[in-house]
Structure formats: structure tokens, C-alpha cells
Image: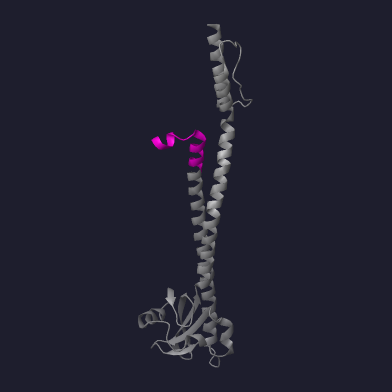
Amino acid sequence: MPLLARFPIRVRLTLAFAVAMALVLSATGLFLYLRLASALDQTIDDGLRTRADDIAALVRQADSGLREGGGARLAERGESFAQVLDLAGRVVDTTPQLGERPLLSPAELARAGERPLQLDRRLVPGIDGESRLLAAPVRAQDRRLVVVVGSSLEGREEALSGLLAQMLVGGPLALLAASLLAYALAAAALRPVESMRREAAAIQAAEPGRRLPVPPSRDEIARLGETLNSMLARLEAA
């Protein structure tokens, strides 16, 4: 690009490194975000399945219920909740914070009566934020019922928001530090070239035998210095 060609080579190297580093940091941040989201989802799903099994066992006991002490350990206030419905949509049992409103629509209830059903991003009265539900059929007390357990996604969203905020703050700082280091390395790598340039500008015809400083490293810059010194020697001989 014509505009970039006007910048010193050390600046161009730094810009190229900064772009590459930004892509790497973005890809790494996206990977970490998706991995954390997947791990949190797996934890929530495992907890829902475990609570569904526990509440199904509780429902099979005719003398126990979610409103009583037996269900308290299965549902934390504001975090998780449960409800038992019959296939007609009536609430058979529920944790106190839900009230008497069924969590499932008639269509969802019909599907849950046949096989487990997971519902995401639901707003549940009495629960902060969106929730994830798991409904599973159970046969108890001589009738077919549906156990519905749910968990608030507020903690999940807070964890992901916290990670995103840290990446938005830490990412630019890491990119700035890496770019400054890249600039310093580029300047150090090009320092021998600047030394040869100054020496070449100072060489005069009245000073035969004067040569350019060659760095001790056996790299391209050293070979360039040796080639230029050989050229100077040929010019003196001519």
C-alpha cells in the first residue's frame, strides 16, 4: 500500500505484528468464551437431569411434596425450581416461588408427556432472568405426570459477561505491550543497518581502507555488510 510504504520499516513490521497478534487474541478470546459457555451449559444440564430424577423419586412417595420440607433441598430460592403437572395442565405440586401457574403450554406438556423436553431462554414468574427448563414424564400415584425442573441462567450470563469484560480490558493491554516489544525488537534488529549507513555516509576518498562495521551474527545483515565491504575494496583497487 502506498501509504504504508511511507512509514519506516520498523513501524511497518510493528503494524504487521499488531494485526497478527490482534487476530490471535481475538481467536483465543472467542475460543475461551465458547468453551466457558459450553462448560456452563453442561453443568446446568447435568444439574437439571439430576434434580429431575430426584424429584421424580420424591413424587412417587404419596406422603411427600415439593411444598413441604422434602423439596427444599431440590430447589434453591431464586436459583432453581420445580413443578409437577398432570397431562391436563393442572399443577399437582410446585415449589413456593412459582405459584399455581403451569410452566408448560398445552403443546409443550403433550410433548413432555411422551419424552424428556428441554426449553431454553424462558422467563419464569418469580425467577430472576431467563431460565432453562427440563420436563420429563413420570408415572406416580396411579397416573401419568410430568416433572418440570428449571434453573436460572443469571449466573451463567454473569460469568460470561465477566469473562468478556476481562477480555475487553486485558486484550488491548496485551496487544499494546506486545506491539511495543515488537517495535523494540525490530529497532534492535535494524540497528546494525543504521550503523552501516552512518559509516557509509562518513567514508571519503581520502580515507582508503575504511570499511563498514559488520555485525558478528551470520545473518542477512552481516552478509550485506560483507558484500558492501567487498564492493568498496574493488572500487579502491580500480
- Residue 82 drawn above or below residue 7: below
| Residue 77 rendering spot, x and y as whole percentages | 55, 82
Report the number of discs: 0
From this viewpoint, which residue is outermost toward the bottom? 63
Residue 107 relative to residue 177: left or right: left
Residue drawn 53% across and 10% down? 235
Secondary structure mainly formed by the magenta segment: helix
Residue 69 in which image quadrant: bottom right
Residue drawn 54% across and 64% down? 162
| Residue 70 rendering spot, x and y as whole percentages | 58, 87
| Residue 34 rendering spot, x and y as whole percentages | 49, 60
| Residue 196 rendering spot, x and y as whole percentages | 57, 23
Residue drawn 53% across and 83% down? 55
Residue 11 counted in the magenta span: yes
Residue nearest the viewer, comparing 162 with 38: 162
Residue 119 counted in the magenta span: no
- Residue 220 drawn above or below residue 235: below
Residue nearest the viewer, comparing 183 with 201: 201
From this viewpoint, which residue is outermost toward the top? 238
Q: Confirm whether residue 183 shows in the render.
A: yes
Where does the N terminus fall, quadrant-wise? top left
Residue nearest the viewer, comparing 81 with 138: 81
Residue drawn 50% across and 38% down? 11
- Residue 31 drawn above or below residue 126: above
Residue span colored magenta: 1-17
Residue 114 relative to residue 188: left or right: left
